[in-house]
Image (cartoon, grey):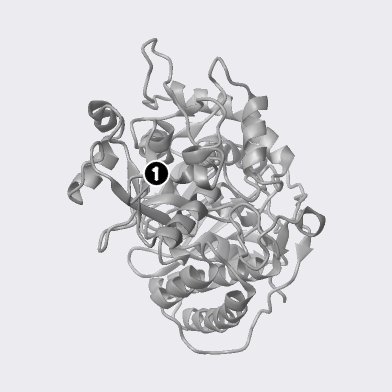
Amino acid sequence: MTVRGEFLIIGSGIAGLRAAISLAEAGSVIILTKADPRESNTGYAQGGIAAAIGPDDSPELHFADTMAAGDGLCVSEAVQALVTDGPRYVRELVAWGVDFDRDAGGAPALGREAAHSVRRVLHARDTPGREIGRSLWQRVRVHPRVRVFEDALAMSIVTRDSVCFGATFVGSDGRVGQVEAERTLIATGGAGQVFRETTNPEIATGDGIAMAFDAGARVTDLEFVQFHPTALNLPGAPRFLLSEALRGEGAWLVNEAGERFMARYEPAGDLAARDLVARAIVREVERTGAPVFLSMAHLDSDFVRRRFPMIAQVCRRAGLDLATDRIPVSPAAHYMMGGIETDLQGRTSLERLFAAGEAACTGVHGANRLASNSLLEGLVFGARAAEAMSGPVVPAVLFGTSVDPVPAVPSGSDMPTAPAVRDLMWRCAGLMRTRERLQPLVARLSAWRTAAARAHLGSPTDRELRRLASLATVGLLVARAALRREESRGGHFRADFPQRDDIHWQTHIADVLRT
């Protein structure tokens, strides 16, 4: 089956849906989504969307907070675009009917999260991502120029002479199809499932990053993985995210003795940047030999349950009361700062191939993402990519500076399993990294990537092999970049190089496939 459209969007999160709304005004749009179109990382966002709309806020202040969180590696032009365009696109969401929480005066209620200097996070209870996705999907699904193929798993990017002409996919009937398009946007979200412990849903396997890389696109900054400090830590229970908004509203991190311990490690305490809090939790567990907890027992219980109904419900199912009990937490893989390298309009190194959202890397997050900038990133750069896709072909101007090509066919042939990849990544490329662990990891993943890719070529309709190939490919790219960066910065921590090194490493590591 061959389907033709002017624009192809792979993915149905905030970046893809926002792009589709604009692109539908310029031509026919085809959306491929491998699950229900409402099932994406966007729907799992609990904190909210950050934008400088408050009376005590400004884009300049938002810019400063984002740059500080990025630990010296943000691309300033990307941050400027984010914080300048952000208020306009957030107000557009309000006009489109997104039901953000309101204050007593009827204005959007603003929350505060770690590393923000003021309250600037718009929220909808504790399911803002789901609410934003609902509103965008309602606009997309009724547009006559948009066709959505559900349960359609993209398998490869179609290129000729480094120019993208669409993608192949496997439909719900198990047959291979192809979309021929003038411009293609990858908006497939992140790759948290590369790690054994993650807050991400099952669909977050890095397919878009892997497919773009295999097609010859550059990827950048993949060593920078954000490990969220507070995921529910109960044996046998999913690693459910406990939003940073909890600490923004006054929750404390305490050890088994009930002591607040964060000040021992960070001056900003419970509201330090995510990478700092995550490592502080690991150190406190090592120091005490006991778990750590999130506590809201000192706050008004009615407020806690009203402000966080979904999180309270999940805790209740686990036999805990969010408002009164100590909730056991530990870090888990949450967000990829790196991805397919793009310019500020979503253009990649391949002509006519674009990327936006978590699958892309504009350098806006640097080495560590500021809380609640992720939904804003998808919104702003999804819209910017759509604008470029509907305009003339213009070469991308990219920012990655260190390219060390990956061999197209590395040695080795032993076949991996998805749990083996995820377990090895968590143990060897998690919060604490060393050359001793990373070198054998790179060798093993190189062999596994080859085996998975060959198996997938032999069975092109096998969805599990596509998943396995994605996990092995993205895992290898993360591990290679982590091994090369001999310093610690943001979400990347090398125990054997624990200091930040601006002289040698204030640069972006790019990877590309050797052909």
> What is the quadrant of residue 476 in the picture?
bottom right
For label 1, count other residues whose C-alpha is less than 10 Å away and answer few (under 14), some (14-19) or many (20+). many
Q: Residue at x 45, y 21 (%)?
A: 95
Residue that lies at the very extreme toward the top in this rendered image: 105
Return the x and y of residue 185 as percentages of the image width and height: 57, 51
Q: Residue at x 50, y 36 (%)?
A: 21
Return the x and y of residue 452 as percentages of the image width and height: 49, 80
Return the x and y of residue 231 as percentages of the image width and height: 37, 52
| Quarter of the image that includes the N terminus | bottom left
Question: Which residue occupies the foreground of this view, 373 or 457?
Answer: 373
Tell me if I can see residue 189 in this picture. no
Q: Which residue is mark 1?
A: 253
Mark 1 falls on what kind of element?
Answer: strand
| Quarter of the image that includes the C terminus | bottom right
Identified by mark 1, the residue type is: Leu
Position of 225 with respect to 126 (left or right) is right
Position of 309 with respect to 61 (left or right) is left
**Whether residue 457 is situated above or below residue 146 in the rendered picture:** below
Report the label total: 1
Position of 45 with respect to 62 (left or right) is left
**Whether residue 400 is situated above or below residue 82 in the rendered picture:** below
Question: Which residue occupies the foreground of this view, 118 or 349?
Answer: 118
**Whether residue 438 is situated above or below residue 69 in the rendered picture:** below
Return the x and y of residue 334 as percentages of the image width and height: 46, 53
Tell me if I can see residue 106 in this picture. yes
